[in-house]
Structures are given as structure tokens and as C-alpha cells.
Amino acid sequence: MEPLSRRAYAKLNLGLEVVGRRDDGYHDIVTVFQTVSLYDSLTASPAAEFSIRCRNPALTGRHNLVWQAAELLREGSGSEQGAAIGLVKSIPVSAGLGGGSSDAASALALLDRLWGLDWPEERLAEAAGRLGSDVPFFLRGGAALARGRGEVLDPLPTPPDWWFLLLMPNIRMPGKTPALYRRLRHADFSDGSTTEALAESMRAGAPLEEAGMVNTFERAASETFPGLERFRTALELAAGHPAHLSGSGPSLFARADGNDAGLEALEELRRQGFNASLVRAVDGGEQA
């Protein structure tokens, strides 16, 4: 049997508002997810045992969400089948781009096919939600308005010509996302209406407006990640547009004025030694 393969796309949070803390310890959010053309690659082949092969040995153990996705499927189905997973990483780890969650969703989809489980979409989504709040989104990708912890999804159209410059600082922080949530203040919370309006404008096919691209974590991230403002300034000068935080950071993105202008800006950022990419918005049909 030929190996099955799938791209695990990165995401941007075009808008992200934290509404407040929940009784269960999580937070309610309103966000617009958008997959973009930076991706990890996963392959799955039949095997007697389960294993992950990756150039980064830190990503081959049981703590990886890909491994945990396999355990959830085996537990839920009673299957004892194995698989050899190949993982090629291009999305930086813990960068605010959802790489680990996207890998987990791709693993669920691949193993469901490889093992002949044929779980309905709702059952896969339930399993995805147990792995992480944003994992269900990555089963379909594209664009979506997300509420709750990020698992309540309302699909949105993906514009065909949206390009972004992505700058990925090499800043790593253990336990980053919980730490950033702890550093939020009451004044950082909002009602989600700005992001709701962004979603409505996307439904209407309107141009992307900077005013709708808010992120609750901007203040906390600027105070947490050393040198982040230097990265922000470089990106804004190259792109000619404001820079925005993706997720809880530290990755930043800015609009690009098409492919050609984006490539010029990308060349300038790389000339300065930054880890940057030019990406386009990817719709859900490109996920498989």
C-alpha cells in the first residue's frame, strides 16, 4: 500500500479577542482562523507498531499530539493497528501558528483512512477537540469564525488573493500559551464584536481592513518576548502595512500587496537575517 500523505497548514489569527475566563479554567475567545500556505508534511504507512519519524527527535515521542491522536483513535475504535508516520516540519514549534494542532488533525484524518475506520466528521471533530481547542478547525482548514474555546466553528469564505508576509522570531518559551493567558489583565478583555465584524466583512467579500485585525495578546506578548518590537518594526517597514500578532505569538504577519511586492519585501527581510515567508490564504479544499 502506498503511503498516505497530507499537508498540515499553518494558521493565522486574523482577529483574536479574549472575552473572559470560564468556570472550567479555560477562556472564551472570538477569533478568525485562516490557513496559509506554510505547511508541515505527514505521511502514514502500515506498520506493526506505531512510530513517528522526524529530523527533530524531540517530536518523535508520546508527548507529540500526533502520537496522542493515534492513541485516541485506537482507544475509540478498539483497533490495535500500527502505523509509521513521517513528519517533515516547516512550521516553527510554539510560534502561534498552530503547527502542532495542524499536525494532530492531519494525523487523525490520515489514520482514519489508513486503518479503515471511516469515522463520521462529527466523531473525528470530537476526538480533535480532546487534543486541543483549535485542532477541530484544522480538520477542514480554510477560514472560520471560532468561538468558545476555539472549537465552535462557523466556516467563512477564503479570499483567493490574500497574501501575507510572515516573520517568525526564534523566541521559545516553555508553557507559552498558558503563561500569556496568565499575563492578561481585565482591561485586555473585550466583547468580540470587532472580530465578529471582521467575519461579516469576509462573508461580504470586502477587502481586509486593518481596524478589524485586533489581538488581545498584543500587550502581553510585547512585554513577554524579548526584542519583539524590533521584529515588528522590520516587518512593517518591509511590508508597508501594520504587523499583527498570530495567536499568542511570537510570530507576526502583515498584509502583502500581491505576490510580486511580497517577494520584494521577503527578500529584504531575509537579507537582514530574519526567518520570514510569503504565504497566501489557503481554502479548505486544499487541505488534503
Image (spheres, helix red, strand yellow):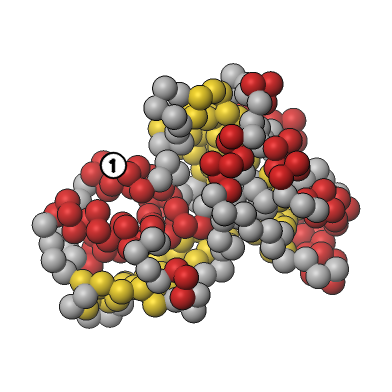
Q: Tell me the quarter of the picture where residue 110 sits.
A: bottom left
Q: Which residue is mark 1?
A: 126
Tell me what residue is drawn at x 59 percent, y 19 percent: 191
Tell me what residue is drawn at x 72 percent, y 49 percent: 225
Category of crowding for the residue at label 1, using alpha-carbon neighbours closer than 10 angstroms: few (below 14), some (14–19), many (at least 20): few
- The residue lying furthest to the left in this view is 78
Hey, what amino acid is under mark 1?
Answer: Glu
Would residue 216 be visible to someone looking at this image? yes
Q: Is residue 113 left or right of residue 96?
A: left
In front: 202, or 151? 151
Tell me what residue is drawn at x 51 percent, y 57 percent: 99
In the depicted structure, whether residue 3 falls above or below residue 269: below
Q: Tell me the quarter of the picture where residue 172 sits.
A: bottom right
Would residue 239 be visible to someone looking at this image? no
In the depicted structure, whether residue 146 falls above or below residue 173: above
Q: Position of residue 214 (x, y in %)?
A: 69, 33
In front: 40, or 68? 68
Q: Position of residue 233 (x, y in %)?
A: 86, 50
Tell me what residue is drawn at x 77 percent, y 60 percent: 262
In the depicted structure, whether residue 283 falls above or below residue 147: below
- The residue lying furthest to the right in this view is 237
Q: Is residue 36 left or right of residue 66?
A: right
In the depicted structure, whether residue 32 falls above or below residue 276: above
Q: Quadrant of the N terminus?
A: bottom left
Q: Quadrant of the C terminus?
A: bottom left
In front: 86, or 122? 86
Q: Number of numbered discs present?
A: 1
SS class of the residue under badge 1? helix
Q: Position of residue 32 (x, y in %)?
A: 56, 37
Q: Position of residue 195 (x, y in %)?
A: 61, 28
